Image (spheres, grey):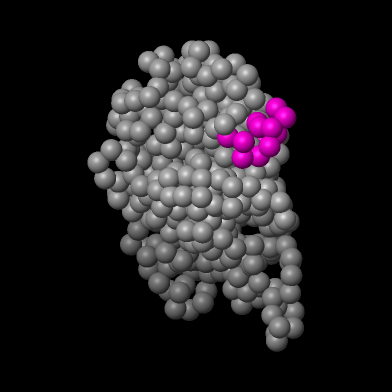
Amino acid sequence: MKTRLEHDLLGERVMPDYCWYGIQTQRALDNFSITGIPLSHFPELVNALAMVKQAAASANRDLGVLPVTKAEAIITACQDIQLGKLHDQFVVDMIQGGAGTSTNMNANEVIANLALTNTGHQRGDYQFLHPNDDVNRSQSTNDAYPTAVCVAVQIATEPLIVTLQALIDSLHEKGQAFNHVVKMGRTQLQDAVPMTLGQEFEAFAVTLREDIDRLHEACALLCEVNLGGTAIGTGINAHPEYSALAIGHLARISGKPLVPATNLVEATSDMGAFVFFSGILKRLAIKLSKVANDLRLLSSGPRTGLGEIRLPAVQPGSSIMPGKVNPVIPEAVNQTAFQVIANDLAVTLAAEAGQLQLNAMEPLIVYNLLSSIRMLSSACEMLDQRCIRGIEANEDRCAEHLHNSIGVVTALVPHIGYTQASRIAAQALMSGETVRELVLAKGLLTPQELDRLLSPEAMLKPYMTLEPESVL
């Protein structure tokens, strides 16, 4: 096997020549084997790192601090990586010590070696183009890494918004399709007042639609980056004009409206935007889990539960009970939500653990943010395509529950009084008679009056919006 000899602060290392990464990446591989999930698992992060390095090389070229030939070689290598080349060489574990230095050096070394081979040199010939002196020029891990993360999270969020919108559209379509199905609404798992199944599904759509706006707001916070702050935000080793110029290039390359942070020292140590973003992901997860809970309840039985909707059967539900089909898709959504909630706690603790001018726990924040985004995107797509689109209404069961419920008595309160209505409800509950039967037996209202008051048109709208001839 052909090898090459590389050296760093700690000494020399024989590297297999087929590796596009170098000695510092190899040391990280030796040290960190935590999750088994490498950087390449998140192509958004790999591409964002390449974008940052491309922007830095462009700014350094423009300022005359990096020879044009070297800058162009770096830029070409970064563009190749953004097209998917050598992603498998981003091998460092997502969780690592060093505040992301291993991630930054993995990118520096791969880019340097790709640039070298593109210009006719051998991998490891760093005298012609160096990972630190050239690819990392005017940068520190402490500004390049978090800036790449801000870009990566925004890129990763784009498919989440797409899948979430598709789920919302499907829920809205079901709301329209089920709008004629009258059923009982429930509070605290007890009968409340009538509603339509369509109103229930439309509420699902509305609550999730709100979070698309929140995701956009969270992405906007990530557009303020600290590139150019270098080690602690003071900009040491960078040209005075480098920060604004590099961020301008990065905004053009990434397509994101990036701007320099107001205070680079503060931005280098603050994780507030990531905490906020994680909180939005948790909020979405909680809402999705609530929808999943409701779907499981509404489909329960199917004969001895609520059974008001039928979920599509996607797999047999038991190895022992013939004919059993479980709500496996909503259950998977629930579990996804629980993991996202746990990820948010990890982000919170990692953000709190920052000390002085840096937060060394940022790799954990990055890992959990990107994991949550990907899980939520997959969960939304699964729930939409494998569950929501195939849901059917059990109209007979909805009508049966409505007919047998004492909750409809609430619609009579303005006409027979709360006390009388309470007596009717208690008697109906004890005797098994319907509210309608008891009201007619007591002569409290005529059949025609009851028909108007217990009609869907009357029970599903505010009292004062009824037409005058419908109100007694």
Quadrant of the rendering where the N terminus is positioned = bottom right
166 left or right, relative to 53: right
> Where does the magenta region start and end?
114-126
Please, what is the dominant secondary structure of the magenta stretch? loop
Residue 370 x/y as whole percent: 53, 47
> What residue lies at 73% left-to-right and 62% top-to-bottom?
312
Residue 458 x/y as whole percent: 53, 47
- Asked if residue 62 shows in the view, the reply is yes
454 left or right, relative to 343: right
> What residue lies at 57% left-to-right and 40% top-to-bottom?
109
| Residue in the foreground of this view, choosing between 162 and 367 | 367
Label count reads 0
Residue 32 x/y as whole percent: 48, 58
| Residue 125, image quadrant | top right
> What residue lies at 36% left-to-right and 40% top-to-bottom?
271
| Residue in the foreground of this view, choosing between 387 and 302 | 387
Q: Is residue 453 above or below residue 216?
A: below
Residue 214: say if magenta: no
| Residue in the foreground of this view, choosing between 298 and 80 | 80
442 left or right, relative to 305: left
Residue 435 x/y as whole percent: 50, 66
Q: Is residue 267 above or below residue 25?
A: above
